[in-house]
Amino acid sequence: MREDLSPLFASFTCGSLKIPNRFVMSPMTRKFSPDGVPGDDVAAYYKRRALAKVGLIITEGVGVDHPSAVGHGSMGEENIPVMHGEAALAGWRAVVEEVHAAGGKIIPQLWHMGGIRQEGTPPHPSAKSMRPNDMSEADIADIIEAFIRSAVNAKTIGFDGIALHGGHGYLIDSFLWSGTNQRDDMWGGDIERRSRFAVELVKALRAAVGPGFPILFRISQWKLQDYEAKLAETEADLALIVGALAAAGVDIFDVSTRVFSLPAFAGSDLGLAGWIRKLSGKPTMTVGSIGFDKELAASFAQPTSAIDNLGEVLRRFNAGEYDLVALGRALLMDSAWVLKVQIGRDFEPFDVTAYGRLD
């Protein structure tokens, strides 16, 4: 018999954003937007989750208004959505309208892939990929302006906030991490200077979207190129990063871990979301293996089962580790997952083929 999960169905407010419960759809790359334009199928995909009681939807990563923002070297780069251009913005406006009509809230994750984008890949194969060590002052200014344009576009067409992808080794994170930032100027060196790009970006976005419009920031220790990487080796290092970001204007930290319940630092049971909440004073969102017995990468190679680990989710929520609970694979494979939690029904089994569909 499940515990009393009513605390997870309490409302949450942040600035102009009010959601009816603590469950959030985590951003997941889908590649179903030809030429960067989301269509009716994308709108229906997000609407299904809104209808099934997901409190807040964060979209898949959306390319900002810069030619180097997205591309990779695998199939489907031309199908990554963007947040600029008349057609794409019209598509996103329809998505927002559908989600709002279903009673939901939706925020786009603004994305620049940085050096993880491979050179010569579409949709702009002639654009150079952006790596901290190679970027000029003009490049940095251009990228910040690109984020601003896309953020303003998102607010104008009715999104309920914006989210920044600041983790996983992408551009923002590549400035933060010593493994990819070896600059010796004001944009690199010690933690404070490595944080400067992210901080200046958040300050610029806050000025552009105004007070009260939520800014979320995804942060992670792990990187796509190194699952064992540490953005912050100690609690003190982490405090410097998240404290500066909070002061710059971040409202909520989206704390990406591969397993939400793993302790972040030796000597404490506290997960990474709990540490960031404690150190920043800002609300946090946890994510990572909620609903499954294997973390994301392992689930592609090993038998994976849907499980009910909401007891541990609730325990840590009640202990004040985080304010929001994000779901990735669970909502990809079962749009009614949150509704099933509320009414006590079983979840759908793990289905790796769901990654190739827009159900």
Image: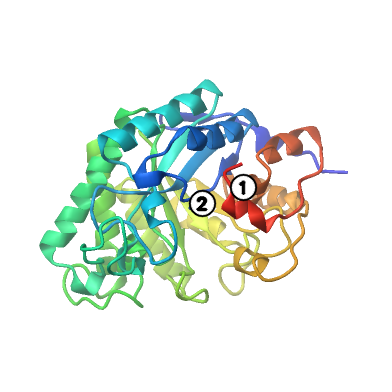
- Residue at image coords 65%, 61%: 261
Furthest-top residue in this view: 101
Q: Is residue 270 left or right of residue 99?
A: right
Q: Say which quarter of the image contains residue 359.
A: top right
Q: Is residue 42 left or right of residue 78?
A: right
Q: Secondary structure at mark 1?
A: helix
Furthest-right residue in this view: 1
Asked if the residue under mark 2 is in contact with the one under mark 1, i.e. CB atoms within 8 Å, the reply is: yes
For the N terminus, which image quadrant? top right
Q: Is residue 74 left or right of residue 249?
A: right
- Residue at image coords 58%, 53%: 356
Q: Is residue 229 above or below residue 151?
A: below
- Residue at image coords 47%, 34%: 106
- Badge 2 amino acid: Met
Residue 321 visible from this viewpoint:
no
Residue 143 visible from this viewpoint:
yes
Q: Say which quarter of the image contains residue 298.
A: bottom right
- Residue at image coords 34%, 65%: 117
Q: Which mark is residue 28?
A: 2
Q: Which mark is residue 288?
A: none
Q: Which x, y percent locates residue 254?
A: 48, 51
Q: Which x, y percent locates residue 40?
A: 48, 32
- Badge 1 amino acid: Leu
Label 1 sits on residue: 332
* Colour option used: rainbow
Q: Say which quarter of the image contains residue 69.
A: bottom left
Q: Nearer the viewer, residue 203 or 172?
A: 172
What is the distance, in whole Å, between disc 1 and disc 2 at their CAs? 8 Å
Q: Secondary structure at mark 2?
A: loop
Q: Which x, y percent locates residue 323?
A: 57, 44
